[in-house]
Amino acid sequence: MQLPKPHEAEIQKQVMQYLWAIGAFAIRINSGAFAGSHNGKKRFVRFNSEPGTSDILAILPNGRFAAFEVKRPGWKRPSGEREEKQAAFLAEVRRRGGVAAFVTGVDDVVKELET
């Protein structure tokens, strides 16, 4: 019998708990947008200003910036425009000296922090 893959939200929670446990200042970021109306006016609201922003942003105990985009186990590589924007965001964080990666669990985070 094969166990079901955990949802991204479950993995995000585990990663956040791990980062807090090691003393990181970590926050969960909501990305995306929604359309709605208020007082008869239509509005389009983005949740943040940077396309592809990672699910989790952190300042590690050593002061280094980290960004982790969480995916379900079995995920292999970016596909589609949304994931390409996520990959570009991660690449920019790495280019500027931060730790950044797509992760499918806490083990991936541990590996990234060891390098």
Image (spheres, helix red, strand yellow):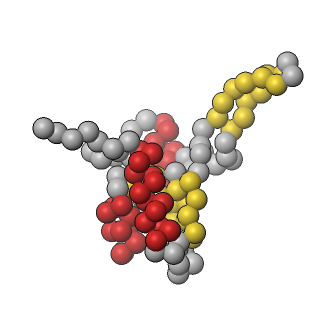
Residue 54 place in picture, x, y as percent: 53, 52
For the question of whether residue 100 can be seen, the reply is no
Q: Is residue 29 above or below residue 59?
A: above
Q: Quadrant of residue 2?
A: top left
Q: Residue at x 64, y 48 (%)?
A: 50
Please indicate whether residue 114 sits to the left or right of residue 36 in the image.
left
For the question of whether residue 51 can be seen, the reply is yes
Viewer-proximal residue, 55 or 52? 55
Please indicate whether residue 37 sits to the left or right of residue 100 in the image.
right
Residue 95 place in picture, x, y as percent: 51, 66
Q: How many marks?
A: 0
Q: Quadrant of the C terminus?
A: bottom left
Residue 65 place in picture, x, y as percent: 55, 69
Residue 16 place in picture, x, y as percent: 48, 60
Viewer-proximal residue, 6 or 95? 6
Q: Residue at x 33, y 44 (%)?
A: 6
Q: Residue at x 46, y 71 (%)?
A: 21
